[in-house]
Image: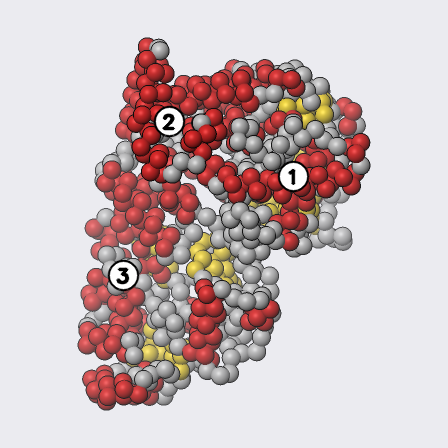
Amino acid sequence: MRDHVWTDERNREQRRWVESLDEGTICSLASSFHGGDPCTIFQDRRRGSFNVCFFVQFTRPPHDRWVVRLPIAGAVPQPMLDEKLEIELATMRYVAAKTTIPVPKVHAYAFSNESAALDGHPFVIMDFVAGQDLNRLGFGRDEVWGDLLAPGQPQTPATRRVHEQIADVYVQLRRLEFPRIGALGVRSRRVPLTSCSPDEIVVCNRPLSVAMAGQERSGYGPLLAFPPRTTFSTASAFVKALLWLADNYLDKAPHLGMDVKEPKAILYAAHHFKWYVRQEWLDHSRNLGPFVLAHGDIDQVLGNTLFDDDYNLVGVVDWEWSWVVPAQFLVPPSWLAGDSPGNLLYAQDAFNEQCRRLLQAVRERERKRGPAAAIDERMGFSFVVPARRCHSAITLALKFPRLTYYVYWDYVFKAKSPRWRSATEKDVGQRQSTDFGSRIAAFMAGSQKRWDFLARKIREQVEFFEAERLSPEQECEVADWVTKEISGGTVVRKELISWFAQRVIQRDGCCDALPADFVDVFLGRHPDLAKSLVVPPRPVPESSAKRSKAGRLGALERMKEMQRQERTRALFGNSPPPPRQPAPYPEGEILYHCDSRYVVRHGETVTKYTTYDHGMGANEHPNEALALRFVKANTTIPVPEVISSDWDRLTMEYIEGQTLQQAWPVLSAEQRSSILEELRGYIAQLRGLSGGPIGRLDGQGAVLPTIMPRSGGPFNTVAELHHWLVRPHRRLESQSMYFHQITAQLGADYPVVFTHGDLAARNILVRDGRIVAILDWEFSGWYPEYWDYVFALRGMDKIDWDTLGSQVPSLFAKRYDLEYILVQFILTL
């Protein structure tokens, strides 16, 4: 069974393939379809689940921008590869001709074995659409959208505008009716799909889906029920084929979640869901139509609709899973109540309210077009969701069989059992043993085949977990590690979880690869962690003026505003820098986000920036940029190369690796010892650099690297620094008694050396058991020799003690424990 799983090695092969693609070859390919005009890459390549996109701009006016998109080798099963491309091209051509829905214009394409430039790999070249998808616009995650999970809240202008735009797409798609179910295409691939007549485009391909691709990739043989060019003449035949696909998944998937779900309940849900769909949900009066075109992906993915800054729809992309289906499948998007499709099931009242608002937008669109264009609301537009017919939930389970269990128990079962709809958690616990137990027992008693089937699936489940090779202790370690990384501001992605889990089992003596779906299975067992894996919303500049215009602030907002003002006074006194307008924030993969700070990777560079009003300081270039150049010029300490800098950002080379905090648990004893020895040498190099005055390298003075930092100076002597240190700007008069004792104990004869200022395991990058970079030099400068010792210990008490914190005394030639105690006390004043 393990041999049929799409392994982690396959994922690595795909990443290597994407990285191996030559940008020069891509540009030459694009130029060959643009009269030979030269072009350059203007945006980093972007990889999705099935495709990789390159963004090119031609150097001659009008400087056209195109997207060159290639299917990722191995991501799409070969039997579906060209068919999927044909479906997308035909659909885009048809939609562009028959509607006003904005779709990119296709300029060129090639099927397999037709492109010499790419060694026969298929591609498509289309216009670049300048817009943001709803995920990047932070849909449902900030005040712009309102609280989508709170029924009765007024609709914000942004949400209303998006509803209007989505409604218009649905209305226009609903009008495109066809005689059969399937997917669009042409009868011969000799017909040019960029210029053919819309009348040449017909339903002639099978209705492909993401679930079908996944099953084929895993070796489950789903295409047996969907041979090439298969179409359906009735809704019942199409639904029967989808239910067969669900049965195929149930029969062949080695992991059905029986470790967290009652096995008999899984089988019960699968059986009764099929019965419900056939007998109650499917509208047999419309068995012969109408059949309409659906995008296939915008009902569950936020990333396929692009909007401008005023929330006008500027593009609908990724039509590769489009299909012609019964109108009952044209359903409200599952993300209407927020970016999690789970809200469809677990926040049904909120979801239903958003559906009603979308329906209102649909009716308004229809009213403007006149009564002759009215849509039969029974078919596909039942957005006022009655308790027994939630089309969105049912179609979601039909498209993704792995969701059948949740849709049945959380929606269908409750819909068919009125006394369960408003049941409390206590009620559920009391009724489970009587209601659930009796129903499932009666179901299982009816067939020995069901018991035999469950016995086989339980055996396969055990074998699957044995293949995973993670013990309960290892699983807890991975879960704790993920929690710690998220709490520290790291944007944790599935690849990072897979990396750590793989090294946990390697550390413990196993060298085999984990299954590719390990992370999905792991997150299924830890749903709270799964909810935490969210991409931060698109940042917006902080502005006191904008905040003052925002109206009355709530308690949390008032507290944050007070913290901002306090931070400004502490850093700049009564003379903050004048307002400055930030340049557009860079797009890319967000690696880190905490409060107003972001770290974004774009290709081989990384940009660290802040949305804080006053940026990274009063100067035109941040202290960290000067420090990195200084360290690179005067030591052998590995630091990133500075590419550029401005008052609110710093762009550096990207260095591959993990933080020492991330890697420490899976390092060998020899690797840990080697890294600590390297670090001792680097600290010694810093302490060999003397200078002044005391403060940051850019002349802004000393800064305390605390949660609420404050600055002062620069200072000419250590005594001046200590005088400022023990007199915080809000010191109470009663605390004056401590001043003399503290300064007497600290003394004033410390050498002033170059100091990092924030040595922590999270700021040390390692790879293959070696330090490859030391990061985050924003607090660095000239300080007394005890400074790094004190703040390294202080910063690691709760976060890094198990990694680097307990090792700090051994990294310095001299201990400064008294100074540590005194500074700790000072910071409480």
Residue under pointer 2: 256
Task: Bin the neighbour count of mark 3 within 10 Å (Cα to Cα): few under 14, some 14-19, many 20 and up.
Answer: few
* Whether residue 203 can be seen here: no
Question: Which quadrant holds the N terminus?
Answer: top left
Residue type at mark 2? Leu
Residue 550 higher or lower than 367, as above or below: below
- Relative to residue 296, is residue 4 drawn left or right? left
Report, in whole angstroms, how far the alpha carbon at label 2 lies from the one at label 1.
36 Å
Nearer to us in this view, 720 or 19: 720
Estimate the x, y position of residue 419 in percent, counting from the top left. Answer: 43, 31
Residue type at mark 1? Leu
Estimate the x, y position of residue 141 in percent, counting from the top left. Answer: 51, 52
Closer to the N terminus: mark 1 or mark 3? 1
Residue under pointer 1: 359
Task: Identify the residue at horizontal 71%, vertical 53% (top origin).
Answer: 59
- Type of colouring: secondary structure
- Relative to residue 44, is residue 65 drawn left or right? right
Q: Which mark is residue 798?
A: 3
Q: Secondary structure at mark 3?
A: loop
Nearer to us in this view, 738 or 373: 373
Q: Secondary structure at mark 2?
A: loop
Q: Which mark is residue 777?
A: none
Q: Quadrant of residue 811?
A: bottom left
Residue type at mark 3? Lys
Estimate the x, y position of residue 107 in percent, counting from the top left. Answer: 72, 38
Q: Are marks 2 and 3 in contact (CB under 8 Å)?
A: no
Estimate the x, y position of residue 267 in percent, counting from the top left. Answer: 38, 21
Nearer to us in this view, 216 or 41: 216
* Whether residue 733 can be seen here: yes
